[in-house]
Amino acid sequence: MYNKNTIPFLFFLLVVLSSAAVAENSQDFGDYVVHFNALNTSYLPPDTTREYDIKRSKNRGMVNITVLSKTLGTAGKPVAARVSAVASNLTGQKRTIGLREIHEGPAIYYIGDFPITNEGTLRFRVSVTPEGQKDTYEVLFKQQFFTE
């Protein structure tokens, strides 16, 4: 389903867009680093949204999570994890985001899409338990979306 040209796409998207939007969209938990990003799916190329089965729309957002194990001399090794995400708006309405695990070569991502509104701000609570670990790490972040 995924070709060689799209294998690094989501990681590239995560790193480039998160760097452009915020100084650092990652959180360090000792042996692990969790990278995260949320964006409007209309920013994604149509071919990519078809290939990853993402709903491309100005009224849809996407969250992208990756978990890296710190490995000396590398940027980190992607690891599988139990990942869940909940988004709440400023009035406190909550929505559980269904996440899908994607394996592309050595890369592992967790993506999910959800509805957004213009100028709406969502607060995300992401829970991550790396495979084989009992500790659960929690990442909190917020993102404002623009649909116009």
Image (cartoon, rainbow, N blue to C red):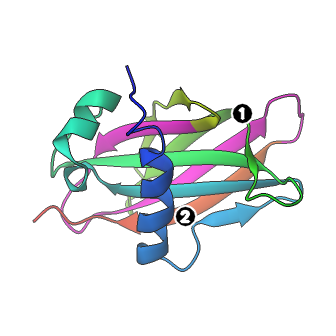
Residue at point 38%, 29% (across, down): 3
Left or right: 20 with respect to 104?
left
The reply to whether residue 53 is visible in this rendering is no
Local packing at callout 1 (Cα closer than 10 Å; few below 14, some 14-19, many 20+) is many
> Which label is found at residue 81?
1
What residue is shown at x 23% (from left), y 30% (from top)? 50
The majority secondary structure of the magenta stretch comes to strand
Which residue is at a point 61% across and 46% down the rendered structure image? 66
User: Which x, y percent locates residue 121?
Assistant: 35, 65
Kindly indicate whether the residue at mark 2 contacts the one at mark 1 (C-beta within 8 angstroms): no
Crowding at label 2, few (<14), some or many (≥20) Cα neighbours within 10 Å?
some
In the image, is residue 74 part of the stretch drawn in magenta?
Answer: no
Between marks 1 and 2 in the image, the one whose residue lies nearer the viewer: 1
Range of residues picked out in magenta: 109-135
For residue 145, which quarter of the picture?
bottom left
The CA span between labels 1 and 2 is: 19 Å
Q: Earlier in the sequence, mark 1 or mark 2?
A: 1
Q: Amino acid at mark 1?
A: Ala
Residue drawn at 21 percent across, 56 percent down: 117
Residue extending furthest toward the front: 4
The disc placed on residue 55 is: none
**Depth check: 68 or 105 in front?**
105
Work out which residue is located at the far bottom of the displayed protein and give it.
23
The quarter of the picture where the N terminus appears is: top left
Q: Is residue 83 above or below residue 117?
A: above
Q: What element does badge 1 sit on?
A: strand
Q: Is residue 125 visible?
A: yes
Which amino acid type is marked by label 2?
Phe
Q: Quadrant of the C terminus?
A: bottom left
Q: State the residue position of label 2.
A: 141
Element type at marker 2?
Answer: strand
Picture coordinates of residue 85, whole percent (x, y): 54, 42
